[in-house]
Image (cartoon, rainbow, N blue to C red):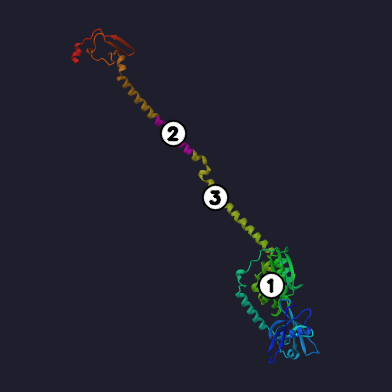
Amino acid sequence: MLPLALHLSRLPGGIIRCVTLETSVDNPAPVRVIANTMTGYVNRLGPIWVEGQVAQLSRRSSSGTVFLTLRDPVAEVSVQVTVARSTFDAMPTPVTEGARVVVFAKFQYYVPRGALSLNAREIRPIGVGELLARIEQRRQLLAAEGLFDPARKRPLPFLPRRIGLIVGRNSAAERDVVDNAIRRWPGVEFRQEYAVVQGHEAARQVMEAVGALDKDDTVDVIIVARGGGAVEDLLPFSDEGLLRAVAACRTPVVSAIGHESDRPLLDLVADLRASTPTDAARQVIPDVRDETAKIAALRERCRSIVGAYVDRERHGLAGARSRPVLAAPRRLLDQFSASIDETRDRGRRSLDHRLSRANDDIGHRLARVQTLSPLATLQRGYTVLQGPDGSVVTDASTLVVGDAVEARLARGRLTATVTTATDTPADKDAR
């Protein structure tokens, strides 16, 4: 048995009762029962307000009903709308295909074809004032989220390798950007992504083009460009989905929508806003002539700075070389060498003088020593007599006959034996 199907039945007093309907392969529900069930369920839904863009408009002469196709401005979603001809003709502002409208409608299920649609009770075209109010409300919402914060804007590369360009096919905006960019830098490369830039498909196609270019690693910057137009024409470039897609890009995005007075919200969320497509080419691509002139000026400035530095160092080197220490480097060495020689000669003279004086002093002392030396006395014929115990004999009475004595002469020694030991009268007087 399959799951239970929902079946609605109306009780007295307008009360709707939900009952279940059991179905199986042996007990299937007829199509009419399912259709009635769908009708009862849809009728329970209350009226709603719906915003969209009129994609198709059909006024059948044989019918009192006007048929509309209401399309979402971004997604590929649409819904059928029916409205009474009297209600449609009573509108103060006629509705045409491409117009943005707000519809007050109720769901209805058409049983013969099994189609679900909206039965409009009121249709209100969205005027410029209301569009601007909606844009301002959206601007305040996105600004509160920080999508317009200057801190999140990315700098543009100095010279992009490849530029992603989103424009309408064969549009004047494409020619303005490409021609001016090539004129400024002939080697610039482009990757064009074509999209409709007006109408209900514009926001979606531009969003898809932005995503495709952002995934291309060879694209360094993305330019979204179109010519000027009315507020309604530029409305896709204030679409919230497109704005969030641009804010999420890794690649810098340049907005070149319309002219100076045209300010869609894409200008605020983009990393750079150009007043025109031509201005976008000027701001994204540097001028090869200007850059060449800058390089020449910088080269000349560097040459001047280096020349001035070399001249200053050359003058400093010449001044240093003119100093005496560098002009005659041996002069200082000669002065020190002469001073050393003079000091050495003075040292030698002082040493010779001291040695001469010491030599003379030693000679005098030697003469005195020699004069007072016992050997000098012996050389005059005197003798030193030593007793048996080796002591010097100065008194003859200390010896006895037979003592062996030794006589020391100036040259050599003599050994003798005492035969006589007497005192002389002079010795006695001396004692």
Task: Describe residue 155's horizontal placement relative to residue 340 as left or right.
Answer: right
Earlier along the polypeptide chain: callout 2 or callout 3?
3
Asked if the magenta segment contains residue 342, the reply would be yes
Q: Which residues fall within the magenta stretch?
A: 334-351
Mark 1 or mark 3, earlier in chain:
1
Q: Type of residue at label 2?
A: Arg
For mark 1, what is the residue?
256
Q: Secondary structure at mark 2?
A: helix
| Residue under pointer 2 | 344
What is the C-alpha distance between the residues marked 2 and 3? 40 Å
- Identify the secondary structure beneath mark 1: strand
**Cα gap from disc 2 to disc 1, whole angstroms:** 95 Å
- Label 2: how many Cα within 10 Å (few below 14, some 14–19, many 20+): few
Across and down, in percent, residue 417 comes to 28, 8
Q: Quadrant of the N terminus?
A: bottom right
Label 3 sits on residue = 316
Residue occupying the point 52% across, 41% down:
329
Q: Label 3 is placed on what type of residue?
A: Gly
Which percent across, then down, holds residue 72?
72, 79
Quarter of the figure with the C terminus:
top left
Find residue 419 and report its horizontal and vertical position in percent: 25, 7
